[in-house]
Amino acid sequence: MPFPILSVIVFTPLAAGLLLLVIPADRKTEVRVISLAAAAISLLLSLWTFINYSISAGGYQFVEHVPWLPALGISYYMGVDGISLPLVLLTGIVVFCGVMISWGVEDRPREYYAFLMFLATSVFGVFVSLDLFQLFFFFEIAVFPKYLMIVVWGYPKTREYGGMKLTLYLFIGSVVALVGALAMYFASGLHTFDLLALEKAGFSTAFQRIWFPVVFFGFAVLGGIFPFHSWAPDGHVAAPTAVSMLLAGVEMKVGAFAALRVAISLLPDGAHYWSWLILVLATINVVYGAFIAMIQTDFKYVIGFSSVSHMGLVLIGFATLNRDGLTGAGMQMFSHGVMTALFFAIVGMVYDRTHTRDIAQLGGLMKRLPWAGVGFIIGGLVSMGMPGFSGFVAEFPIFMGFWQVAPILAVIAVLGVVITAAYIFRVIGKVFFGELSPEYEKIEPEKPLDKVAIGLLSLTMIGLGVLPGLMVPMISSGVNHVLSLVGGA
Amino acid sequence: MTAAAYDPSMILAILPEIGLIVLGVLVLAFDLAWKEERRRNIGWVSSFGLLVIAILTAVFSHPVGNSGLVWGGMLRWDWLSFVFEMIALAGAAITSLFAMDSGLIGKRGEFYLLLLASTFGMILMGGAADLVMLFLAIEMTSIPLYVLAGFSYKDARSTESGFKYFLFGATTSAVMLYGFSLLAGLTGTTQIYQMAPVIQSGGLPLFALIGVLMLILVGFSFKISAVPFQFWAPDVYEGAPTPVAGFLSTASKAAGFAVLIRFLVAVFPAAQPAPSIHTYWVLLLAIVSTATMILGNVLALAQKNIKRLVAYSSIAQAGYILIGVVAASGLGISGSVYYLIAYLLTNLAAFGVITIVGRMTGSDDVSAYAGLSRRSPGLALVLLVAFLSLAGIPPFGGFFAKVLVFAAAVDSHLVWLAVVGIINSVIALYYYLTVLKVAYLYRSEDETRPAAISRPWTIALVVCVLGIIVIGTLIGPWFNWSTLAANSLFG
C-alpha cells in the first residue's frame, strides 16, 4: 500500500488539535509551535502532492479507498484531481499563514489553536473526498470550530450575532443539500455514496431538474450566492483574523467546490436547465457585492463584501459550463482564496495596532506598516484582475466563457470589476496613504511572522500571475473530467 | 410462530435478569455490612456488577442461532432484545457512577436496588412477547422509577417530581392496560406474535382496532415522552435527582421504544392489500413525530434552566427517533436503534455534566455555566461533545444517527418528514450553541475556583465521550447491531 499522503494531510491538524487539548493550558508557546508544525507538515505535503501530480495522466491520483460501512456503500475514499488539488494547496497555505497571524492570541490559545486545527481538517477533508457521505462528514465538522471561534475570539460587538447567523445559514444550507444527496443515493439504485460511481448513475432528466437546485443552492449558500450571502460579511467581520482568512479564503471555496462536485457533476442536465438562474444571481453577486463594498466605512466590511463579489465570479464560471468558464473558476477559487486571506490578515494587523477599522480615521499607514501596505496593494491588483497577477489569469477566462453564453450579463458583470478597482483604490488611498494620524505614530511595525505570511501570500499571487503554467494546465485537466460529464468539450 | 417447550438453554436467555437479581442481593448485603462512610462504594459494586453482567450476556446470551420465543412465549430472545439489554445495562452502569457523588445522603442501598430493579424491568421490556409480560415489565420499570424520581425526599421539587411522574404514569398505564385487554379479547390471544394473522384475516372491525391502537399508544407515548404525553418530562426531570433524570431520559426511553417497535411491527405489520391498520399507525406516528420534534425544540428555545432545556431537547430527540419507526422499513428501524445507542451515551454525558455543574455551583440555571471553559476546560469539552452530538454534528454519534433516520424517511417516500426533521435540527442547533456560548464566552466571578471532579465522574464522562466518538466514526459494528435488531423483527 502506498504512503497515504492525503490522509496525513487531512489528519495531521486533527492529531495536533487533540494533542493540544491534553497538554496543560498554560504552555502557550508549545501550543503555538505544535500548531505551526502541524500546519507546516500539511502545507509541505500538499505542495509535494501538487508537484508530483501527473497532469498528463489526469484524473484522480493519490487515491485511498477503504470500505467504511459496506452495508450502505459508504467508503473512506480520497483522491485529488486537477480542480481539488490546487484547493488543497490553498488550504495548506492559508492555514499555515493563519497560524502565524494568530501568534498573539493570549486568551485560551490552546482551545483557539485546537479549534483552528479541527477547522483545517474539515476543509482538507472536503476537498479530497470522493465519497458523498464522507464529504458531508467533513463538511459538517466545521460547524463547531467556526461558531466557537467567532463567538469567543471574535469582534466583541458583533460576534454573538455574526457567529450564530453564519452557523445557522451554513447549517441550513448543508442539511438541505444532504436531503438532496440522500435522494440521489436512493434514486441511483446503486447503493453507494461513491461519487465516481454516482456520476454514471444516469438520473432521469425530471429527477435532475427537481433536485439540482436543492443540492446546488444548499452548498452555494456557503459559496456566498445571492440572496443567501448575507452571512458572509457579517460572519467574516465578526470572526477573529485567522478565522476570517479561513472562512473567506477556503470555506467559501468548500461551498463552491461541493456545488461543483456534487450538484453540477452528478446532475448535469439539471445544471444546464438551471444555469441561467445561477448566472443571473451570480452576476448580482458581482455587481451588488462591489457596490456595497464601495460604500462601506468599515475596513473589514469592504473585504467581506468583496468576497461576495469575487465568489460571484466563481459561480459564474461554473454556470457557463464551458471550458473557459470552468478553468477560470478553478483558478479564481485559488487566486481569491490567497488574496482574501492576505486582505483579512492585513486588516487584522491594522486593527490590532490602531484598534479601529473606520476607514475615515485611518491614514498614512504605509509609513508605519510598509509590508502590510505593499501586500494590500498587491492584493488589490489581483482583485482588479490586473495582468501579471493571478487575478487576471482567473478572471479573463471567466469573462471569455461568460461572453459565449450570455453576452449582456457579461457586460453587466464587467461593471463589477470596474467598481472593484474603485473601492480598492479608495481603501488603499485612505488607509495607507494620506496623513498619518499622530496617535498612530508609535504603532509597532509588523512582526517577523506577519511578514512571512504577507510575503508568502503575495509571492504566490505574483508567481501565478507571471507563470500561469504552474497551475492552469492542472486545472484544465480537472475541467476535462467535468466537461465529459456536462457535455461540450 | 409457536413457543418452544422448556429447554435448559432457555436459562441463557434470561441470564441478564438472573445476574441483576444476584447483583441486587449483593447491593443489599453490602448496604447492611458496610458502615455509613463505606457505602459510597456500593456505586462501584453496582457499576462493576452491571459491566460483568453485560459481558456475560454478550458472551453467553448472544442471540446468534438461537433466536425465537422462549419461556412459553413470554419472551422473545433475539437481536432486538439483546441490543436493548445492552442499552439498559450500559445506562444503569453509567448512572451508578454519576449517582455516587451527586449528594444522595444515605439510603444508598435502596437507591441502587431500585435502579437495578428498574433495569430488570427494562430488560424484560426489550424481550416481552406477550401482553401480560409486557405490562408487568413496564410496571416493573416504572414503579422503581417513580420512587427514584422522588428520592431526594427532603427536596419538595423532588417529591413533587416523583408524585407527578407516578400520577401520569399510573393513569397512562391504566389506559394502556385497557387497550391490552380489548386487544386480547378481539384476537383471542395475549401472545403478540399470534395476533397479526388474526388481524390480517380481516374479521375484526377496523374502527375497534384503531381505538385499541390509540389506547395502547397512550401508554407507549408516555414512556417515550412523545406528544401529547410529553408534558410530564420537564417537570419530572427538573425535580428528580439529576442522575435519575439522565436515566429516565435515556434507558427508560429506549425501553419504551423497544416495546413500541416490537409491538407495532409484530401486531400490525405491513400487509397486502392496503389500506390496512399499518397505514393508520404510520400516519398517526408521523403526526406524533412531527408534533414532538416541533414542540420539543420550540419550547426548549425559551428555557433558562438547563435540566428543562435538556428535557425539551430529549422530547425532540424522541421525535427524530420516531422518524425511523414511521419509515417502518428495515433501514428505518435500524436507524432508530442506532439513534438510541448514540443517544444513550450522549444524553448521559449531558446529564453527567449537569450533575457535576449542579454540585459545583449549586444551580441548574444556564447562567451557572458561565466561565465553565475557564474553570474546567475538560468539563466544557464534554458538554461540547454531548450537545454537538445531540445536534447531529460529526464526528459524533448523533450525526450518523440523524443521517440514517432522514435517509430512511427519504427511502420510504416521506421526504416531507425528513424536511421537518431538518428544520428542527436547525432550531435545535441554535439552543445547543447558546448554551455552549455561555460556557465558552461568558465570564463568571468564581471561574478561577478549580472544579473538583471525582473519580467515578471522570470515568463515566470519559466512557461517554469516547463512546460518542467511536459510535460516530467506527460506524460498522453499531450499525450491524442495529440492522440485526431490525431484521429480527422482519425476518
Image: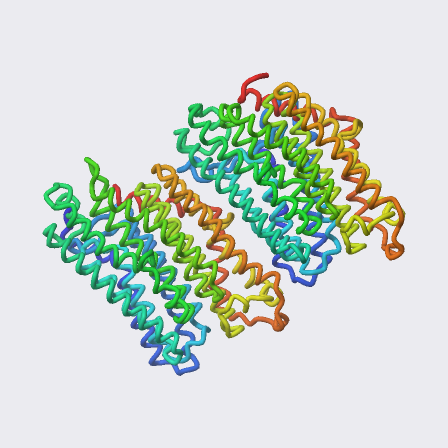
- Quadrant hosting residue B127: bottom left
The residue closer to the viewer here, A66 or A345, is: A345
Tell me if I can see residue B470 in this picture: no
- Quadrant hosting residue A260: top right
Residue B403 in percent (x, y) is at: 43, 43
Q: Quadrant of the N terminus of chain A?
A: top right
Residue A284 in percent (x, y) is at: 63, 33
The residue closer to the viewer here, A384 or A387, is: A384
| In the image: residue A132, left or right of residue B127 | right
Q: Quadrant of the C terminus of chain A?
A: top right
Rendered position, A489 above or below A441: above
Q: Which residue is pictured at 71% across the width and 27% down the height?
A: A414
Rendered position, B4 above or below A217: below
Q: How is the image coloured?
A: rainbow
Q: Residue furthest bottom?
A: B35
Count numbered badges in the picture.
Answer: 0
| In the image: residue B173, left or right of residue A231 | left
The residue closer to the viewer here, B46 or B229, is: B229
Residue B118 in percent (x, y) is at: 30, 66
| In the image: residue A445, left or right of residue B119 | right
Residue B6 in percent (x, y) is at: 15, 55
Rendered position, B417 above or below A415: below
Tell me if I can see residue B287 in this picture: yes
